[in-house]
Amino acid sequence: MELIEAEELFNQALEAEKNNEIDRAIELLSQIIKSSDELKIIYAKAQFNRGLLLNKQNKFAEAEEAYKKVLREDNAKVYVKAQYSLGLLLSYLKRYEAAEEAYGNIIREDNKQIYAGTQLNLGLLLNKQNKFAEAEEAYKKVLREDNAEAYVKAQFRLGLLLNYLKRYEAAEEAYRKVLREDSAEIYAKAQFSLGLLLNYLKRYEETEEAYKKVLREDNAEAYAKAQFKLGLLLNYLEQFKEAEKAFKKVLRKDNPIIYASAQLNLGFFYHKKDQSQLCLQHLRKVKRIDSCFAYAYAQYALWLKTNNKIYLKHVLKTDDEEQFYSAQFHLGELEYISNKSKLSQILDYWNNISEKSEWYPKIYYKKHLIEKVLSIKSIESSALLDIFKKVDLLLNSLVIKNENEDLIAHYTSPFVAKLLVAKEICGFKENSNIRLNTIDLMNDPTEGEILNHYLNISSDLISTNDQAFMGCFTLHHDSLNQFRLYGKEDQKEGSGLSLILSNLFFEQENSFSNIRLQNTSNSISESNGVTENDDSESDLDISSITESLNEKIIQKLPLYRCIYIDPDSKLIEISHREEWTFCREAKSSKSDKWDNYSKDIKELRDGVREEFQNLENLIQPLYQKISKNIKKYLNEAELLAEILLPLRFLVKHMAFKEEQECRVVYVTQWDDHFVQYDQDRNRFYIDYGQDVVTHLKKIYLGPHAVHEKNMFEYLCAHAKQNNRTEHEVKIKTSHNPLR
């Protein structure tokens, strides 16, 4: 083949490509062969162009073959282009090692501009393979004088990499090397990422400055993100007017997802300012087409603002799974608390909730009982449902959540306390957990029977075979009575101590997750935060009872105040703090806090008394039928016992009122994998998995445990040093005298 003929074929191929005759162009280029040295240059160009066209047609194997036919000795300039394109192709095909080899064939002397682009691509490729040190090296080989655009992209990517590696100072340096005159678009991205980094480092003034350098004309999407994040920052800094302005600068055309998140946060913003109309206006601007995630949250917020459940029905599973489950939970709850509950409708909603969802523990016991009520198919089903609602109402009222009951005491021995607090120190390896013990270890022999006695029902007819495990706590932090009874070492009164825990050691609401149904696995789930691209924030605090999937440990249970009943008079009291505890705190014989607290407690106690009477009135007509014909009403009797079960172990004899006890209760069966056996002490127990030290605020040493002060100061200081707690634990000695 003559050179002139080859050039003619090449030109015809270019013309065919221009006319979109790709197959003809490829055919013409294929006809060019390297039959002599003078054809080397045109042959290299033909193979390179052929590779590009085949790549366009997704004929990757043929494209690869064409690129590889371009040799350095034939045409050095085209060779580097071919190797660059080959690297891109192999990287796309995830043949990373081969792509690295292709990129490695390009040296700076060949073509500085292409070399810079190659090193950028090589860095991206290595980063994708988690070869971070090699990626960093590649990014740093890209020089501004070789290729300004590739340089700023490399510095931006280097900043992201170093930020990921927590080398924050170096990351900041890389971001700051990106100049606007090199690439306005990449500069905007770099300033936004710099803002995120500075915000993390709590350098808020510099954060604000970085966000404000991102301009819409440079990069509309980065601008929208920067304004949104700026709004969050200014809101946090309580610069509310400026925050409002920032959120409002985000337009739908900039980025629909960020726009939706900005409107959502404006809704929250106006809600906090009690500007309901503006709140609703912005929440309604959040459209599903912009962001399914933000839309789901907006609909939930609209329900909270308007009490119109239609908004909950708008939330679809495809919008956001957890928010959908939340909506289904609340729709079921609304039906459940209505005067004429449609049980099948409740189940229709709750059956949509996945067992893996954080909402499932809140409904599985209620769902189980409703299914049993429906299965009875008798006129007594409505009575059973009313009884269950009453028990549910009582349990909700008994959860410890008064602001003056934020610290809870647990009395134990110094030895056990060391097991709970010490970790990798003083001969202790791992710290232990608080144990929930069986009912037979409680000091009240009437445990579990007092409730039936009050309700005038027989335990022979109304009972279950469940096992109860309990953890006992009290609202009295420094009680001589408790020191004399509990935590004794060598049977010596007053030798124990009390651990004062934050109420966050416990679940904050009643959810029935402390009850394991017979023949089921533990329906206790782990909570997960929900985010979308880190672009949305809300005030929603979602928590649930959790279970460690790898250990026999229950993570959180609600703490209930005990009910004390005098069997003879049927007088009811509830556990609470006494006046002297407030006065001791105030160091005064009078406390305003006590006045307010005592009113709250009186109101709560009167409510409990009234609801107990209502409960008895509801139960008695049904119980009379059961007692007269147990065979006919066996299902009703079993279900009644199951409904009363959560309340049964919170009721104690009035003789123990001085203890002012609160309890966590876990009801289960012997086949539960949480149940463990201590052979040395001949006891069954369940571990309560919250770390005591994390929630420990104070320790009161009993009158005869003062010699332990140095030890516990040392253990708690060690725990703080090792970041097991963020605060200093105060070690105090009891104010109570004891010989």
Image: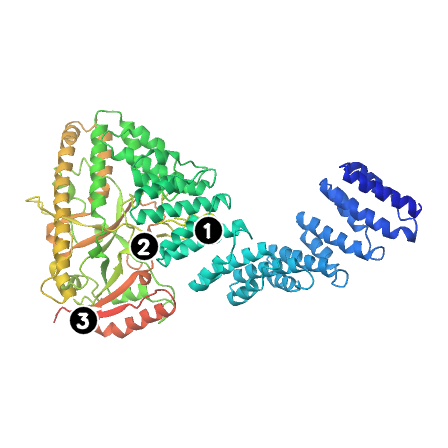
> Which tag, 2 or 1, sits closer to the chain's start?
1
Q: Is residue 457 visible?
A: no
Which disc, if any, is residue 418? none
Residue 111 vs 50, above or below: the answer is below
The image quadrant where one finds the N terminus is top right
Q: Residues within 10 Å of mark 2 (few under 14, many from 20)?
A: many
Q: Observer-nearest residue: 313 or 415?
A: 313
Residue 94 vs 495, above or below: the answer is above
Q: Amino acid at mark 2?
A: Tyr
Q: Observer-nearest residue: 521 or 148?
A: 148
Task: Quickly name the residue at label 2.
Answer: 688
Q: Residues within 10 Å of mark 1 (few under 14, many from 20)?
A: few
Q: Position of residue 395 (x, y in %)?
A: 22, 44
The image quadrant where one finds the C terminus is bottom left
Q: Amino acid at mark 1?
A: Asp
Residue 429 vs 634, above or below: the answer is below
Q: Position of residue 470 (x, y in %)?
A: 25, 51
> Which tag, 2 or 3, sits closer to the chain's start?
2
Q: Secondary structure at mark 1?
A: loop
Contact between labelled residues 3 and 2, with CB atoms less than 8 Å apart:
no
Mark toward the viewer: 1 or 3: 1
Cα separation, mark 2 vs mark 3, equals 28 Å
Q: Is residue 349 visible?
A: yes
Task: Quickly name the residue at label 1.
Answer: 534
Task: Quickly name the residue at label 3.
Answer: 704
Mark toward the viewer: 2 or 1: 1
Cα separation, mark 2 vs mark 1, equals 33 Å
